Image (tube, rainbow, N blue to C red):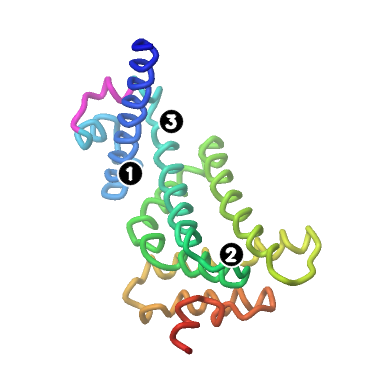
């Protein structure tokens, strides 16, 4: 029994160490870009030896892919988090998800800098492209599920196209908001996002956002 408990503890400890190394890589990549984030520099950032990093990651490329996956998954989870307290109405849930995708902590100039750095690597690394595809499809599928729940009739093909279009709108606004954080009024981009996504889908998402309802009462 003690042996089983001990093995479980060790696995958890190694998982935490691996996560700490990934976060150190993300922090350094945000400062100096993927090219400057060498294994030695990441080790210094994490306060460990380069050998420990190689124990968890067989190469810098493997660690870089893990760092990119961490960044993208964190943004997706931050977009999902407000749904835990959202109303049950489909319009409200979609509105909350879209708004969260265009607010901090998802809309973050630091995150965009990391994303832009990784984008260069995708041109030459098919495995990095696969990591990107996984995160893109996960977000798009979540968006499509929220769209499918709306009280309207749409084929599977139309739902997919709607999700692609809406995702494109959100991505474009996210990039502009991260690149020019002082260029827009507070809440302006999320309102534009809600209006644009709503126009694609034929629903009033701006009014469906819970805080908008409160302001209008």
State how far apart marks 2 and 1 are (Cα): 25 Å
Q: Nearer the viewer, residue 151 or 110?
A: 151
Q: Would residue 68 be found to the left or right of residue 36 on screen?
A: right
Q: Nearer the viewer, residue 168 or 150?
A: 150
Total label count? 3
Residue found 66% across the figure and 59% down from its top: 144
Residue underneath mark 3: 62
Residue underneath mark 2: 168
Tell me, yes or no, whether the two marked residues, 2 and 3, touch with CB atoms within 8 Å.
no
Which contiguous range is marked in magenta? 47-54
Residue underneath mark 1: 26
Q: Which quadrant of the structure image shows residue 22?
A: top left
Find the residue positioned furthest to the bottom: 217
Q: Which quadrant of the structure image shows residue 8?
A: top left
48 inside magenta stretch: yes
Q: Is residue 115 above or below residue 46?
A: below
């Amino acid at each position: 029994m003690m042996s089983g408990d001990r093995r479980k503890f060790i696995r958890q400890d190694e998982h935490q160490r691996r996560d700490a190394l990934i976060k150190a890589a993300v922090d350094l990549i945000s400062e100096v870009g993927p090219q400057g984030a060498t294994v030695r520099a990441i080790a210094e950032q994490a306060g460990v030896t380069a050998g420990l990093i190689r124990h968890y990651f067989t190469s810098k490329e493997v660690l870089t892919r893990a760092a990119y996956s961490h960044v993208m998954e964190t943004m997706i989870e931050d977009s999902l988090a407000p749904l835990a307290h959202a109303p049950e109405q489909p319009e409200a849930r979609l509105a909350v998800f879209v708004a969260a995708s265009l607010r901090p902590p998802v809309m973050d100039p630091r995150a965009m800098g990391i994303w832009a750095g990784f984008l260069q690597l995708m041109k030459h690394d098919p495995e990095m492209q696969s990591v990107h595809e996984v995160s893109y499809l996960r977000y798009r599928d979540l968006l499509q599920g929220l769209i499918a729940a709306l009280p309207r009739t749409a084929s599977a093909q139309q739902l997919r196209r709607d999700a692609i279009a809406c995702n494109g709108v959100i991505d474009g606004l996210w990039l502009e908001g991260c690149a020019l954080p002082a260029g827009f009024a507070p809440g302006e981009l999320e309102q534009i996002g809600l209006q644009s996504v709503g126009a694609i889908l034929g629903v009033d998402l701006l009014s469906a956002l819970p805080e908008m309802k409160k302001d209008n009462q």
